[in-house]
Image: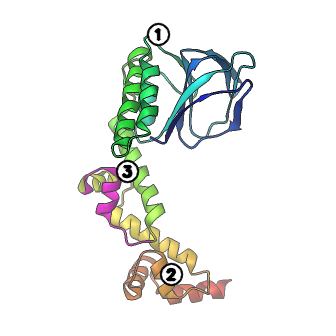
Amino acid sequence: MYQCGTEVCDPGHYYGPAVRDHFLIHYIHSGRGRFCVGDKVYHLSRGQGFLICPNIVTFYQADMEDPWNYSWVGFHGLKAESYLRSAGLTAENPVFSDSGDNYISECFRKMIEAKNLAKGREIRLLGYLYLFLSQLIEQNGTGLFIDTAGSRKEAYVKKAIEYIDMNYSRKMTISELARSIGLDRSYLGSIFKEHLSISLQSYLKNYRMDKACELMKNEDLSIGDIARSVGYDDPLLFSKLFRKCKGVSPREYRRRYIEAN
Protein backbone atom coordinates (compact mmCIF):
# COMPACT_ATOMS: atom_id res chain seq x y z
CA MET A 1 0.00 0.00 0.00
CA TYR A 2 1.27 3.47 -0.91
CA GLN A 3 -1.01 5.76 1.10
CA CYS A 4 -4.47 6.15 2.64
CA GLY A 5 -6.39 9.00 4.23
CA THR A 6 -9.65 10.85 4.53
CA GLU A 7 -10.75 14.46 4.03
CA VAL A 8 -13.80 16.67 4.51
CA CYS A 9 -13.36 19.00 1.55
CA ASP A 10 -14.09 22.70 1.40
CA PRO A 11 -16.56 23.90 -1.26
CA GLY A 12 -14.88 23.84 -4.68
CA HIS A 13 -11.73 22.10 -3.36
CA TYR A 14 -9.93 20.45 -6.29
CA TYR A 15 -6.85 18.49 -7.28
CA GLY A 16 -5.21 18.50 -10.70
CA PRO A 17 -4.92 18.30 -13.56
CA ALA A 18 -2.17 15.89 -12.50
CA VAL A 19 -0.85 12.35 -12.91
CA ARG A 20 -0.01 9.69 -10.33
CA ASP A 21 2.60 6.94 -10.41
CA HIS A 22 0.33 4.41 -8.66
CA PHE A 23 -3.33 3.35 -8.51
CA LEU A 24 -5.50 5.59 -6.34
CA ILE A 25 -9.14 4.97 -5.35
CA HIS A 26 -11.41 7.57 -3.75
CA TYR A 27 -14.63 6.57 -1.98
CA ILE A 28 -17.30 9.20 -1.23
CA HIS A 29 -18.90 9.06 2.23
CA SER A 30 -21.12 12.10 1.74
CA GLY A 31 -21.57 15.13 -0.49
CA ARG A 32 -20.97 15.51 -4.20
CA GLY A 33 -18.26 16.34 -6.72
CA ARG A 34 -17.01 15.70 -10.21
CA PHE A 35 -14.23 13.54 -11.59
CA CYS A 36 -12.73 14.32 -15.00
CA VAL A 37 -10.51 12.04 -17.09
CA GLY A 38 -9.90 12.57 -20.80
CA ASP A 39 -13.07 13.99 -22.34
CA LYS A 40 -15.35 12.36 -19.74
CA VAL A 41 -16.90 14.06 -16.70
CA TYR A 42 -18.47 11.97 -13.92
CA HIS A 43 -20.79 13.63 -11.39
CA LEU A 44 -20.54 11.52 -8.24
CA SER A 45 -22.11 11.38 -4.79
CA ARG A 46 -22.36 9.32 -1.61
CA GLY A 47 -21.66 5.60 -2.01
CA GLN A 48 -19.72 6.01 -5.24
CA GLY A 49 -16.02 6.00 -5.91
CA PHE A 50 -13.50 6.50 -8.70
CA LEU A 51 -10.21 4.98 -9.80
CA ILE A 52 -7.18 6.99 -10.88
CA CYS A 53 -4.74 4.91 -12.95
CA PRO A 54 -0.98 5.57 -13.18
CA ASN A 55 0.28 8.09 -15.75
CA ILE A 56 -3.18 9.34 -16.75
CA VAL A 57 -4.13 13.01 -16.35
CA THR A 58 -7.13 13.49 -14.06
CA PHE A 59 -8.96 16.30 -12.26
CA TYR A 60 -11.51 16.17 -9.46
CA GLN A 61 -13.39 18.85 -7.57
CA ALA A 62 -15.84 19.09 -4.67
CA ASP A 63 -19.29 20.56 -5.27
CA MET A 64 -19.69 24.21 -4.31
CA GLU A 65 -22.93 23.66 -2.36
CA ASP A 66 -22.53 20.11 -1.05
CA PRO A 67 -18.78 19.32 -1.03
CA TRP A 68 -17.81 15.70 -0.68
CA ASN A 69 -16.18 13.92 2.22
CA TYR A 70 -14.06 11.11 0.86
CA SER A 71 -11.42 8.59 1.81
CA TRP A 72 -8.68 7.32 -0.47
CA VAL A 73 -6.22 4.49 -0.77
CA GLY A 74 -3.21 4.37 -3.08
CA PHE A 75 -1.41 1.16 -3.97
CA HIS A 76 0.69 -0.63 -6.56
CA GLY A 77 2.04 -4.12 -7.13
CA LEU A 78 2.34 -6.90 -9.67
CA LYS A 79 -1.31 -7.98 -9.36
CA ALA A 80 -2.91 -4.59 -8.71
CA GLU A 81 -4.18 -4.09 -12.26
CA SER A 82 -5.58 -7.62 -12.55
CA TYR A 83 -7.47 -7.28 -9.24
CA LEU A 84 -8.96 -4.00 -10.41
CA ARG A 85 -9.98 -5.49 -13.74
CA SER A 86 -11.66 -8.32 -11.86
CA ALA A 87 -13.67 -5.64 -10.05
CA GLY A 88 -14.65 -4.10 -13.38
CA LEU A 89 -12.41 -1.08 -12.87
CA THR A 90 -10.16 0.20 -15.66
CA ALA A 91 -8.99 3.52 -17.07
CA GLU A 92 -11.99 3.35 -19.45
CA ASN A 93 -14.43 2.38 -16.67
CA PRO A 94 -13.16 4.14 -13.51
CA VAL A 95 -16.37 4.56 -11.46
CA PHE A 96 -18.06 2.16 -9.04
CA SER A 97 -20.95 2.15 -6.55
CA ASP A 98 -21.18 0.28 -3.26
CA SER A 99 -23.91 -2.21 -2.36
CA GLY A 100 -25.40 0.00 0.36
CA ASP A 101 -24.26 -2.15 3.30
CA ASN A 102 -21.50 0.21 4.56
CA TYR A 103 -18.86 -2.52 4.14
CA ILE A 104 -16.55 -0.34 2.02
CA SER A 105 -17.02 2.65 4.33
CA GLU A 106 -16.10 0.44 7.28
CA CYS A 107 -12.97 -0.82 5.47
CA PHE A 108 -11.76 2.73 5.05
CA ARG A 109 -12.52 3.57 8.68
CA LYS A 110 -10.40 0.63 9.79
CA MET A 111 -7.58 1.58 7.41
CA ILE A 112 -7.42 5.05 8.94
CA GLU A 113 -7.35 3.54 12.45
CA ALA A 114 -4.61 1.09 11.46
CA LYS A 115 -2.32 3.97 10.45
CA ASN A 116 -1.75 4.61 14.17
CA LEU A 117 -0.55 1.10 15.00
CA ALA A 118 3.02 0.94 16.25
CA LYS A 119 4.08 -2.55 15.15
CA GLY A 120 1.57 -4.26 12.86
CA ARG A 121 0.66 -1.22 10.80
CA GLU A 122 1.77 -2.36 7.33
CA ILE A 123 0.31 -5.86 7.60
CA ARG A 124 -3.00 -4.57 8.98
CA LEU A 125 -3.29 -1.93 6.26
CA LEU A 126 -2.55 -4.48 3.56
CA GLY A 127 -5.19 -6.79 5.03
CA TYR A 128 -7.88 -4.12 4.90
CA LEU A 129 -6.83 -3.22 1.35
CA TYR A 130 -7.39 -6.83 0.28
CA LEU A 131 -10.78 -6.89 2.02
CA PHE A 132 -11.74 -3.69 0.23
CA LEU A 133 -10.66 -5.03 -3.17
CA SER A 134 -12.38 -8.37 -2.57
CA GLN A 135 -15.63 -6.50 -1.84
CA LEU A 136 -15.32 -4.54 -5.08
CA ILE A 137 -14.78 -7.79 -6.97
CA GLU A 138 -17.71 -9.45 -5.20
CA GLN A 139 -20.24 -6.70 -5.95
CA ASN A 140 -19.01 -5.18 -9.19
CA GLY A 141 -16.76 -7.70 -10.91
CA THR A 142 -17.18 -10.58 -13.29
CA GLY A 143 -15.30 -12.97 -11.02
CA LEU A 144 -12.88 -13.72 -13.85
CA PHE A 145 -9.29 -12.80 -13.06
CA ILE A 146 -7.50 -11.40 -16.07
CA ASP A 147 -4.21 -12.64 -14.69
CA THR A 148 -2.71 -15.36 -16.84
CA ALA A 149 0.48 -17.23 -16.05
CA GLY A 150 2.08 -15.48 -19.02
CA SER A 151 1.20 -12.01 -17.77
CA ARG A 152 2.55 -12.83 -14.30
CA LYS A 153 5.82 -14.08 -15.76
CA GLU A 154 6.21 -10.93 -17.84
CA ALA A 155 5.59 -8.85 -14.73
CA TYR A 156 8.27 -10.76 -12.81
CA VAL A 157 10.79 -10.27 -15.64
CA LYS A 158 10.00 -6.56 -15.77
CA LYS A 159 10.44 -6.33 -12.00
CA ALA A 160 13.84 -8.06 -12.23
CA ILE A 161 15.01 -5.62 -14.91
CA GLU A 162 13.85 -2.66 -12.82
CA TYR A 163 15.73 -4.04 -9.79
CA ILE A 164 18.94 -4.41 -11.81
CA ASP A 165 18.57 -0.87 -13.14
CA MET A 166 18.30 0.45 -9.57
CA ASN A 167 21.00 -1.73 -7.97
CA TYR A 168 23.65 -2.63 -10.58
CA SER A 169 26.07 -0.09 -9.08
CA ARG A 170 26.46 -2.03 -5.84
CA LYS A 171 27.51 -5.56 -5.00
CA MET A 172 24.12 -7.22 -5.49
CA THR A 173 23.41 -10.92 -6.02
CA ILE A 174 20.84 -12.83 -8.05
CA SER A 175 19.56 -14.47 -4.84
CA GLU A 176 18.96 -11.02 -3.35
CA LEU A 177 17.13 -9.94 -6.52
CA ALA A 178 14.89 -13.02 -6.39
CA ARG A 179 14.08 -12.43 -2.72
CA SER A 180 13.07 -8.84 -3.44
CA ILE A 181 10.46 -10.12 -5.92
CA GLY A 182 9.39 -12.99 -3.68
CA LEU A 183 10.43 -15.82 -5.99
CA ASP A 184 12.76 -18.79 -5.84
CA ARG A 185 16.06 -17.97 -7.55
CA SER A 186 15.89 -20.95 -9.91
CA TYR A 187 12.31 -20.20 -10.95
CA LEU A 188 13.05 -16.53 -11.60
CA GLY A 189 16.12 -17.52 -13.62
CA SER A 190 14.12 -19.93 -15.76
CA ILE A 191 11.32 -17.49 -16.65
CA PHE A 192 13.84 -14.71 -17.27
CA LYS A 193 15.74 -16.87 -19.77
CA GLU A 194 12.46 -18.06 -21.29
CA HIS A 195 11.44 -14.46 -22.06
CA LEU A 196 14.79 -12.85 -22.98
CA SER A 197 16.90 -15.83 -24.11
CA ILE A 198 19.69 -14.84 -21.72
CA SER A 199 20.46 -15.82 -18.14
CA LEU A 200 19.94 -13.34 -15.31
CA GLN A 201 23.65 -13.44 -14.47
CA SER A 202 24.64 -12.69 -18.07
CA TYR A 203 22.07 -9.92 -18.34
CA LEU A 204 23.42 -8.29 -15.17
CA LYS A 205 27.02 -8.58 -16.39
CA ASN A 206 26.19 -7.15 -19.83
CA TYR A 207 24.15 -4.34 -18.25
CA ARG A 208 27.08 -3.39 -16.03
CA MET A 209 29.52 -3.45 -18.94
CA ASP A 210 27.26 -1.25 -21.05
CA LYS A 211 27.07 1.22 -18.16
CA ALA A 212 30.87 1.04 -17.85
CA CYS A 213 31.19 1.96 -21.53
CA GLU A 214 29.13 5.07 -20.90
CA LEU A 215 31.37 6.01 -17.96
CA MET A 216 34.50 5.57 -20.09
CA LYS A 217 33.56 8.83 -21.79
CA ASN A 218 34.36 10.68 -18.56
CA GLU A 219 38.17 10.97 -18.56
CA ASP A 220 38.17 12.11 -14.94
CA LEU A 221 37.24 8.60 -13.86
CA SER A 222 39.94 5.97 -13.49
CA ILE A 223 39.31 2.35 -14.49
CA GLY A 224 39.09 1.55 -10.77
CA ASP A 225 36.48 4.29 -10.31
CA ILE A 226 34.43 2.89 -13.15
CA ALA A 227 34.72 -0.65 -11.80
CA ARG A 228 33.36 0.44 -8.41
CA SER A 229 30.61 2.47 -10.07
CA VAL A 230 29.19 -0.64 -11.74
CA GLY A 231 29.42 -2.98 -8.76
CA TYR A 232 32.98 -4.41 -8.87
CA ASP A 233 35.39 -3.80 -5.99
CA ASP A 234 38.22 -5.60 -7.82
CA PRO A 235 39.44 -3.64 -10.90
CA LEU A 236 41.30 -6.71 -12.20
CA LEU A 237 38.13 -8.83 -12.17
CA PHE A 238 36.26 -5.99 -13.82
CA SER A 239 38.90 -5.69 -16.56
CA LYS A 240 38.80 -9.44 -17.19
CA LEU A 241 35.02 -9.47 -17.51
CA PHE A 242 35.03 -6.32 -19.65
CA ARG A 243 37.50 -7.84 -22.12
CA LYS A 244 35.46 -11.03 -22.32
CA CYS A 245 32.28 -9.04 -22.97
CA LYS A 246 33.59 -6.31 -25.28
CA GLY A 247 36.62 -7.98 -26.87
CA VAL A 248 39.09 -5.33 -25.68
CA SER A 249 40.42 -4.10 -22.34
CA PRO A 250 38.82 -1.09 -20.65
CA ARG A 251 41.89 1.04 -21.38
CA GLU A 252 41.88 0.07 -25.06
CA TYR A 253 38.14 0.77 -25.29
CA ARG A 254 38.69 4.23 -23.80
CA ARG A 255 41.66 4.93 -26.11
CA ARG A 256 39.61 4.06 -29.18
CA TYR A 257 36.73 6.22 -28.00
CA ILE A 258 39.01 9.23 -27.41
CA GLU A 259 40.64 8.83 -30.84
CA ALA A 260 37.26 8.57 -32.54
CA ASN A 261 35.93 11.69 -30.81
**Relative depth, front residue between 240 and 218:** 218
Tell me the quarter of the image containing the C terminus.
Answer: bottom right
2 or 91, nearer to the observer: 2
Q: Position of residue 106 (x, y in %)?
A: 43, 21
Task: Write the residue at 40% across / 66% down.
Answer: 204
Can residue 199 be spotted in the picture? no
- Magenta stretch: includes residue 174: yes
Query: What residue is drawn where x is 57% and y is 29%?
Result: 91
The circle drawn on residue 195 is 3
Q: Quadrant of the N terminus?
A: top left
Instruction: State the separation of the CA atoms marked 1 and 2.
Output: 61 Å
Q: Residue type at mark 3: give it.
A: His
Q: Earlier in the sequence, mark 3 or mark 1?
A: 1
The secondary structure type at the circle numbered 1 is: loop
Between 51 and 242, the one nearer to me in the picture:
51
The answer to the question of whether label 1 and label 2 lie on touching residues, with beta carbons closer than 8 A, is: no
Mark 1 residue type: Gly
- The numbered dot on residue 100 is 1
The residue stretch that appears in magenta: 170-185
The label number, if any, that marks residue 226 in the structure image: 2
Horizontal side, residue 252 vs residue 65: left or right: left
Residue 171 location, quadrant:
bottom left
Nearest the viewer among 125 and 119 is 119
User: Label 1: few (<14), some or many (≥20) within 10 Å?
Assistant: few
Q: What is the three-letter code of the residue carrying label 2?
A: Ile
- The residue depicted at 49 percent of the width and 77 percent of the height is 229
Which of label 2 and label 3 is nearer to you?
2
Residue 160 location (% of width, % of height): 40, 55
Residue 252 horizontal/vertical position (percent): 52, 89
